[in-house]
Image: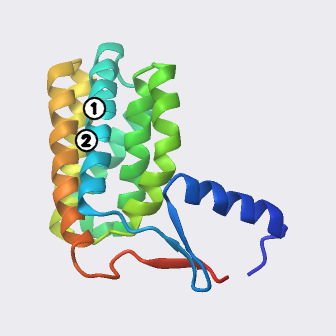
Amino acid sequence: MSLGVGRTPVREAFRDLARDGVLEVRPARGTFVRRLETTELKELYEVRQSLEGLAARLAAQWGPTPALDEYGKHMRKVLDDIDAFDLAEVHRHGVDFHLEVIRASRNSYLLKTYEPMRLKFAIVLNLLLHYDDDRVREAVQEHYDIYDAIRRGDGDEAERNIRDHLAKGFVARARRADAGPDAGQIEVAAQ
């Protein structure tokens, strides 16, 4: 597949991703998405809990954005009939929900801090997906509970809900990361 992009910008992007710890370059073997160790995954989730906990608390003070209200409506539909939805789509929607919670905090510094880490979340954590129907249903309910606390203006509950949700997400992803020596190893470019 051709993207119409020259080699130089691609090399620069790969270099930047390697510097950020997303890619691992193995001379004469290739470039791979770097596998996170359980300790690193835990640290990543600790940062997420802090940032997203604060964001949920602030969002509850301000009230939901129109986009957050749309997520709430969509989650209600999913909860009513999850079998009618594609699990990959439900997951993507959940990832976007987290970003909207950050935006709903109306704190530009929080958004600027979160945005660069979002790529790492997206790449590394998507490698550790396991579409367990029960966990997806739980996650949607957890997302809805976060939204509902924000909608009601309950900052304590919103923060607690998002922290608990992320703690459960860490446990699920840590199990997947520990599944085997090559879990999450995806080659992105041959040398």
In the depicted structure, whether residue 151 falls above or below residue 182: above
Q: Secondary structure at mark 2?
A: helix
Q: Specify whether 44 is left or right of 29.
A: left
Q: Quadrant of residue 14?
A: bottom right
Left or right, residue 49 beside residue 105: left
Residue found 25% across the figure and 81% down from its top = 180
- Residue at image point 45% right, 56% down: 122
Residue type highlighted by circle 1: Ser
- Mark 2 is on which residue type? Glu
Residue 50 disc label: 1
Crowdedness of circle 1 by 10 Å Cα count: few (<14), some, many (20+)? few
From the viewer's perspective, is residue 131 above or below residue 137? below
Mark identifier at residue 46: 2
Q: Is residue 109 left or right of residue 191?
A: left
Q: Quadrant of the N terminus?
A: bottom right
Structure colour scheme: rainbow
> Residue 48: image x %, image y %?
32, 40
Cβ–Cβ under 8 Å for marks 1 and 2? yes
Q: Looking at this view, is 179 or 58 the one in front?
A: 179
Q: Residue at x 45, y 19 (%)?
A: 106
**163 or 92, nearer to the observer:** 163
Percent position (x, y) of residue 23?
53, 65
Label disc, if present, on residue 86 of the rendered structure: none
| Image quadrant where one finds the C terminus | bottom right
